[in-house]
Image (cartoon, rainbow, N blue to C red):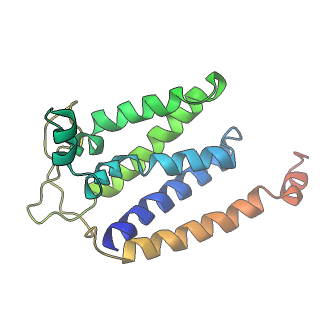
Amino acid sequence: MNTMADLFTHILVGYVVVTALSWRWAWISPQLVTVAMVGSTLPDLNRIDLVLPDSTVEELLSLSFSWTPLHRAGGTLVMIAVGSLLVPKRLRRGVFALLLLGVGSHYALDFLLYKPAGVTADLLWPFTGRQFVIDGFYLSSDRWPAAVATVLALGAWAVDRVVTSPKHAVKNGDG
């Protein structure tokens, strides 16, 4: 359950950030907000190991294998590139940018996690192996970040309904 609260928080923060950006940039449609929300989950695909452990994949492939790189900058960048290539050419730049933004919001939250040793994992590998010393604000098992993210998401949803309503567009002379 703790993992789900953390994943839920990542998704909601991605929603809040990109919904707010959609108020400024009209090309960010509700569908593309969803793309950013998907991006906010990409680094946690390393948790596939809960269902399909590294050792099982190693046995199947007869190769050394690990899911860990999926939660590193290099691994997520590869996933973003692949995801961007799966959409029509006209959408690729936007999808790439929004997946990257979603991943960025994920890593921003991960940097705020409290680590007992005070050191983060090497999230920015292969660009740097440096581990950053950050005190952190919360544990991944805490539920309060999910509650805060829920309140922020409800607020963003409510504001979005006002900002994107036809009445608002006419008021501003847009419609």
Eyeballing the image, is 17 above or below 136? above
Determine the residue positioned at 62% across, 43% down. 32
Eyeballing the image, is 123 above or below 92? below
Residue 111 is drawn in which quadrant? bottom left
* Relative image position of residue 140 (x, y in whole percent): 28, 67
Figure label count: 0
Answer with left or right where residue 155 lies relative to residue 12.
Answer: right
Eyeballing the image, is 146 above or below 162? below
From the viewer's side, name the closer residue of 41 and 142.
Answer: 41
From the viewer's side, name the closer residue of 153 and 134.
Answer: 153
From the viewer's side, name the closer residue of 6 and 170.
Answer: 6
Determine the residue positioned at 17% across, 43% down. 122
Residue lying at the far front of the rendered structure = 60
Residue 165 is drawn in which quadrant? bottom right
Determine the residue positioned at 52% across, 26% down. 85
Residue lying at the far top of the rendered structure = 89
From the viewer's side, name the closer residue of 139 and 171.
Answer: 139
Residue 47 is drawn in which quadrant? bottom left
Determine the residue positioned at 56% across, 27% down. 93
* Relative image position of residue 114 (x, y in whole percent): 20, 65
The quadrant of the image that shows the N terminus is bottom left
* Relative image position of residue 86 (x, y in whole percent): 55, 30
Answer with left or right where residue 31 lies relative to residue 16.
Answer: right
Answer with left or right where residue 174 lies relative to residue 161.
Answer: right
